[in-house]
Image: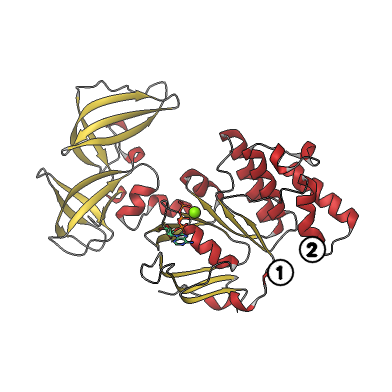
Amino acid sequence: MLDQGTDDAFVAFERVQKSYDGETLVVKDLNLSMPKGEFLTMLGPSGSGKTTCLMMLAGFETATHGEIKLDGQPINNISPHKRGIGMVFQNYALFPHMTVAENLSFPLEVRKIGKSDREQKVKRALDMVQMGAFGGRRPAQLSGGQQQRIALARALVFEPELVLMDEPLGALDKQLREHMQFEITNLAHQLGITTVYVTHDQTEALTMSDRVAVFDDGRIQQLDAPDRLYEEPQNSFVAQFIGENNTLEGKVLEMTGSDRCVVQLDDGQKIEAKPVNVEKAGDRTRVSIRPERVEFNKDRMQEGALTLKAEVLEFIYMGDIFRTRLRVAGNDDFVIKTRNAPDQVRLTPGSQIEIGWMPEDCRALDAS
Ligand SMILES: Nc1ncnc2c1ncn2[C@@H]1O[C@H](COP(=O)(O)OP(=O)(O)OP(=O)(O)O)[C@@H](O)[C@H]1O
Ligand SMILES: [Mg+2]
């Protein structure tokens, strides 16, 4: 299905396929359109085609089928130096013979920006990545994380209209990573830069992006705003891939109205769920429930909650939250999360409890 409004999109992939060897498609029928200024993240397992999509958008690889457009024009028709694309790739190749400052100044010189302007922009970009004191060093005299930050600064220094970033923060520690996440999104929004960002880190994807495209097997499995992706996964892959998720296997007994169905779990118990991509009685399904939507405290259980019996297998203290592993309907990996509040109960392994959730929080997805 083509996205709406492809015509006035700033970036558009239209029915794009890519094969490197002429046999297997590593990108299959990709349709995506981004408005100007959007921050979109591609998230997905290794080998799912994310870098390939960036390379095609940058013009370094050509699509085997379909078309990629930038500002309404097929990318192939725009010469590389006119594309105005800033890039940070997985291997952050800096020019080894140039100093850090010269590396950053280079894209500005190419664009014929005057000396004093250049110096100012270089300084600002270096400060942004907390590398202000390193302008005189060469790349070989920097750590991996420092090189990565310089590569990032170089991609942003000329304030491009479109920035492509492939795992730009992979080599950084948690604190610096979080700082840079903030700096990147801030800058992108301030300057109205359109960004395509690739990461393996789902927290990063959820916190930074306007929309996230979840990739698997060369296809976008779901493209949505972070909250919708987490709360309304459209299939089992997305439910499992984004955040922590509990699944119970069974089959649909009956469709009861447009947004309810009855599922018989494999141990015989029946529960109500919201049918998402099951169609009819008899369909195998995997029911999905987020750990924080499960309640075991009777006083806090909402009216209309469904209940099931559970056995406590393990209690893990994690500081801010408690993570408790349960056996539910034959599943030994059913996890619930509770906030560490003064009145919160710490469940003891071996005890039998009753858990409950609202039927709308329980999604009947495909069993594949
Ligand atoms: N130049 C190439 N020649 C042949 N096959 C390639 C080439 N580049 C990538 N591939 C293959 O295409 C598929 C998609 O690779 P791609 O680099 O796009 O994945 P990715 O989603 O970026 O993965 P990762 O998260 O590991 O970086 C993989 O199976 C990979 O082996
Ligand atoms: Mg990659």
Q: How is the image coloured?
A: secondary structure
Residue 79: image x %, image y %?
Answer: 67, 74
Report if residue 74 is visible in the image. no
> Badge 2, how many Cα within 10 Å: few under 14, some, many 20+?
few
Q: Is residue 241 visible?
A: yes
Residue visible at 21% across and 64% down?
Answer: 279
Q: Which residue is mark 1?
A: 81
Secondary structure found at label 1:
helix
Q: Which residue is mark 2?
A: 110
* Of pointers 2 and 1, the one earlier in the residue sequence: 1
Identified by mark 1, the residue type is: His
Judged left or right of residue 157, residue 224 is left
Outermost residue, front direction?
97
On-image quarter of the C terminus:
bottom left
Q: Is residue 77 above or below residue 40?
A: below
Q: Is residue 205 above or below residue 297?
A: below
Percent across and percent down for residue 106 are 78, 56
Q: Picture coordinates of residue 181 (x, y %)?
A: 60, 44
Is the residue indicated by label 1 positioned so its CB lies within 8 Å of ligand 1?
no
Q: How many neighbours does mark 1 have within 10 angstroms: few (below 14), some (14-19), or many (20 or more)?
A: few
The residue under label 2 is which amino acid type? Val
